[in-house]
Image: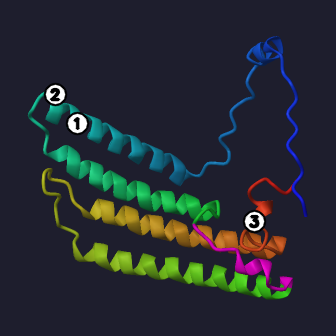
């Protein structure tokens, strides 16, 4: 199958200038979950701490010790809550090469097995992380008097969200009859 050549239509400067006269479409924020907003807030806390650390270290030549620790813990929250939104959107790294050579029925069975393994992994990780967080309830951060358990329970919550999102993704895959592994083009917008 030969790819279709790209067709570029010529656009005049006036036509291009009039594009900016059009009103922008209304913002649609319905596709974002609660973990997206919490992740965004944790990201900006991390950015603020890094900027403050840079400013105090290199401009004032007297850095705040607590900024690095808070930035590290904010990064932990960003990573694990960000992983939850990647599960929801089926955007984790996945290898779909094998599915091209499997029969549709075999591909469906294998994709369902992957869904079950993913649910099991995240559920087990939730239990393990909860056990770990419950071992250190009174441990405080090094530079400020704030319990580390808050961060670790945020990771527990993130793994629990990943488990729930995995169940939801598996349910949607079962309903539609295929997953992103079987038909990646249905998820990236190239199948129209």
* Mark carried by residue 129: none
Q: Residues within 10 Å of mark 1 (few under 14, many from 20)?
A: some
Marks 1 and 2, the one that precedes in the sequence: 1
Q: Quadrant of residue 89?
A: bottom right
Tell me if residue 14 comes above or below residue 129 in the rendering. above
Looking at the image, residue 133 sits to the left or right of residue 27; the answer is left
Give the CA distance from mark 1 to mark 3: 42 Å
- Residue under label 1: 54
| Residue for badge 2 | 59
Q: Label 2 neighbourhood size at 10 Å, few (<14), some (14-19), many (20+)?
A: few
Which residue lies at the image location 79% right of the left edge and 82% below the top edge? 101
Please give the range of residues in magenta.
93-104
Residue lying at 30% horizontally and 77% vertically, measured from the top left:
132
Instruction: Tell me the element at label 2.
Output: helix
Is the stretch drawn in magenta largely helix, strand or loop? loop
* Front residue (pair 114, 183): 183
Neighbours of disc 3 within 10 Å: few (<14), some (14-19), many (20+): some
User: At which x and y percent is residue 105?
Assistant: 84, 86
Residue 6 at x, y = what percent?
85, 43
Q: Quadrant of residue 103?
A: bottom right
The residue shown at (59%, 84%) is: 117
Residue position marked by numbered label 3 in the rendering: 184
- In the rendered image, residue 55, in percent from the top left (x then y), is placed at 21, 31
- Residue 88, image x and y in percent? 62, 62
Mark 2 vs mark 3, CA separation in Å: 49 Å
Residue at disc 3, secondary structure? helix
């Amino acid at each position: 199958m030969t790819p279709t050549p790209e067709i570029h239509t010529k656009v005049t400067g006036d036509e291009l200038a009039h594009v900016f006269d059009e009103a922008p479409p209304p913002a649609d924020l319905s596709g974002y979950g609660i973990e997206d907003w919490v992740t965004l807030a944790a990201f900006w806390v991390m950015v603020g701490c890094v900027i403050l650390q840079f400013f105090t270290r290199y401009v004032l030549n007297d850095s705040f010790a607590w900024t690095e620790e808070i930035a590290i813990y904010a990064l932990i929250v960003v990573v694990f809550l960000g992983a939850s939104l990647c599960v929801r959107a089926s955007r984790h790294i996945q290898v779909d090469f094998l599915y091209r050579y499997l029969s549709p029925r075999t591909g469906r069975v294998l994709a369902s097995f992957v869904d079950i393994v993913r649910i099991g992994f995240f559920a087990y990780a939730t239990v393990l992380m909860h056990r770990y967080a419950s071992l250190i309830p009174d441990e405080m951060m090094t530079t400020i008097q704030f319990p580390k358990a808050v961060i670790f329970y945020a990771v527990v919550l993130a793994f629990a969200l990943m488990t729930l999102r995995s169940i939801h993704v598996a349910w949607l895959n079962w309903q539609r009859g295929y997953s992103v592994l079987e038909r990646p083009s249905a998820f990236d917008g190239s199948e129209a």
